[in-house]
Image (cartoon, helix red, strand yellow):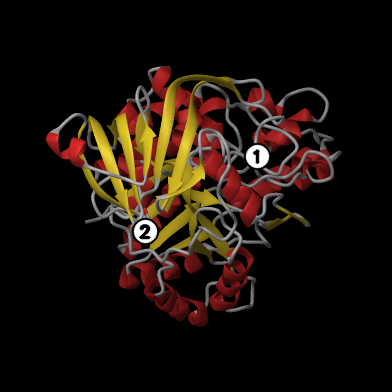
Amino acid sequence: MSTRTLIRGGLVITAAEEAHADVLIEDGRIAALAAHGSVAAESWTADRIIDATAKYVIPGGVDAHTHMELPFGGTFASDTFETGTVAAAWGGTTTIVDFAVQSPGSPLRAGLDAWLAKADGKCAIDYGFHMILSDVNEGTLKEMDLLVQEGITSFKLFMAYPGVFYSDDGQILRAMQQAERNGGLIMMHAENGIAIDVLVEQALARGETDPRYHGEVRKALLEAEATHRAIQLARVAGSPLYVVHVSAEEAVAELAAARDRGLPVFGETCPQYLFLSTDNLAEPGFEGAKYVCSTPLRPEEHQAALWRGLRTNDLQVVSTDHCPFCFKGQKELGRGDFSKIPNGLPGVENRMDLLHQAVVDGHISRRRWIEIACATPARMFGLYPRKGTLMPGADADVVIYDPQAQQTLSATTHHMNVDYCAYEGKQITGSVETVLSRGELVIDRRTFTGRAGHGAFTPRATCQYLN
């Protein structure tokens, strides 16, 4: 049975334009758009009509950096693929790209299959995977080619976490060379982990064990140095580079310098770096543990450089790096030793709202909001125009957004499976009202109507930002 949904009377906002238009949805895809009140729009009939008067009609968010069920530091991220994707939907995100993890010594395929099994039948929204390379060798380099053909077109490497995920410069160069040949995109966690481990050891020896020291040892200069080194290795390999969770002004400067030279270098930042700071890490008692993530929160003065980078397109994407650990029983593993605090913050539900608040506050425009949260992540990771925009033929991933609604972010009302909110008490203007995923109502006027298993695994093309 063909089903038709008509969204009437809203302000349609994409990265390219804004228009008062009606949106016709048929069989899970956008069938047409027409000016509100036009002859074409008035002629449309539908099984379901959604009134979007005085609301925004925007593409569903694409969060290209999440970690559901990630093993880390002897525990696991507290959101499952079910709870995490339900929370994402509540926040107006309709596609996530999570990370499958290769276990050292095992094939990439084994890691991918394990993560496909974790997510299968569990997700409320569509999902894809990047591949974390823990062990670069001749076998895994060959496997990269096969994964690209299967729609796993991006590969994450770590300059941090020696003994866990760390790759040395030679391994990174080899992976970049392989990506240059197969069209894959290398994603880099750029921090000098070898040097950081020295500073961690020295801080603990001095008795500096509180959460705030997590930020002090992971120095901005060591993020900038690693970013610079990753850029030079990518230049040698002739490959594009995407630097994840950029937090420091000095790292933004390295990306800007590379882009000024015309290099295919891209940067992502996250809401925590735009709205939180080392003041949170220094909260009294052990409260600062809630804010331990890597790269770490920086002093507040770094925020201006990040906002500027988003306006100038030296930073192209805002993702969450959603990797939640409960304060009780998980973050507490690091009492008396900040290096044992699991690294990660919850945020998949808050990203679209926080970025709308940035529009209200004058940091970015409405179209730039959609660009950094929907369109560019879709293009960067081979999902566009199926995802990230509203145009005929695109998946009907649509959010009706109330720009006037007032809300207070809180753990008492969020849907993430974690016992605290990183933005507890923050007042936000704007709220998700209704969410459709491939034409199906997932959130209907602030009521969850979706289901685990609706979300489909979505193979991706190679990076479309280079075309």
Q: Is residue 181 above or below residue 62?
A: below
Foreground tag (2 vs 1): 1
Q: Residue at x 48, y 40 (%)?
A: 246
Disc 1 residue type? His
Q: Which mark is residue 415?
A: 1
Circle 2 sits in a helix, a strand or a loop, which is it?
helix
Q: Is residue 358 above or below residue 324?
A: above
Q: Which mark is residue 98?
A: none
Real-space CA distance between mark 2 and mark 1, rounded to the nearest whole angstrom: 39 Å
Where does residue 135 sit, x and y in percent of width and height?
Answer: 58, 71
Left or right side of 69 for 19: left
Where does residue 109 sit, x and y in percent of width and height?
Answer: 54, 77
At label 2, counting other C-alpha atoms closer than 10 Å, the crowd grade (few under 14, some 14-19, many 20 or more) is: many
Based on the displayed image, in which of its 4 quarters is residue 222 positioned? top right
Label located before the other in sequence (2 or 1): 2
Based on the displayed image, in which of its 4 quarters is residue 61 positioned? top left
Q: Which mark is residue 234?
A: 2
**Residue 361 shows up from this direction:** yes
Q: Residue at x 55, y 55 (%)?
A: 159
Left or right side of 378 for 123: right
Where does residue 296 sit, x and y in percent of width and height?
Answer: 61, 37
